[in-house]
Image (cartoon, grey):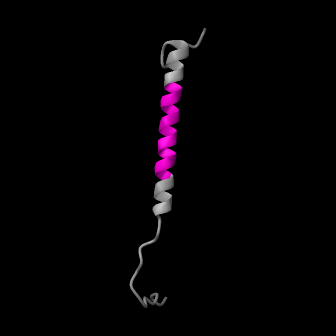
Amino acid sequence: MAPPNETGPRIAPQNDLYTVMLIVATALLLFGIVYLAMRSIQLFGTLLPSSGA
C-alpha cells in the first residue's frame, strides 16, 4: 500500500465548539445534581431519605 501524499502543512482540527459544548454540558449536569441534593435536604431533611419500609 502506498503512503498518503502530504502536500502541505497539517492544520489542527477545529474542535473548540465541541470543547465548549462539553464544558456547558458538564456545568449543567453539576448544577442539576446540586439542585436535586438541595431539594432533597429541604424536603426530607437528609440527602438520601429512608426507604419507608
Name which quarter of the figure residue 43 lies in: top right
Q: Is residue 49 visible?
A: no
Question: Does the magenta run of residues contain 30?
Answer: yes
Question: Does the magenta run of residues contain 23?
Answer: yes
Rendered location of residue 31, percent (x, y): 49, 36
Identify the residue at horizontal 49%, vertical 12% (top origin): 45
Rendered location of residue 53, percent (x, y): 61, 8
- In the image, residue 6 sits, relative to residue 32, either above or below, namely below
- In the image, residue 22 sits, relative to residue 4, either above or below, namely above
- In the image, residue 34 sits, relative to residue 53, either above or below, namely below
Q: Residue furthest left?
A: 9
- Magenta region: 22-37
Identify the residue at horizontal 54%, vertical 13% (top origin): 44
Identify the residue at horizontal 49%, vertical 23% (top origin): 38
Identify the residue at horizontal 44%, vertical 88% (top origin): 3
Q: Is residue 34 visible?
A: yes
Q: Residue furthest top?
A: 53
Report the magenta stretch's main SS: helix
How many numbered marks appear?
Answer: 0
Rendered location of residue 7, percent (x, y): 43, 91
Rendered location of residue 27, percent (x, y): 47, 43
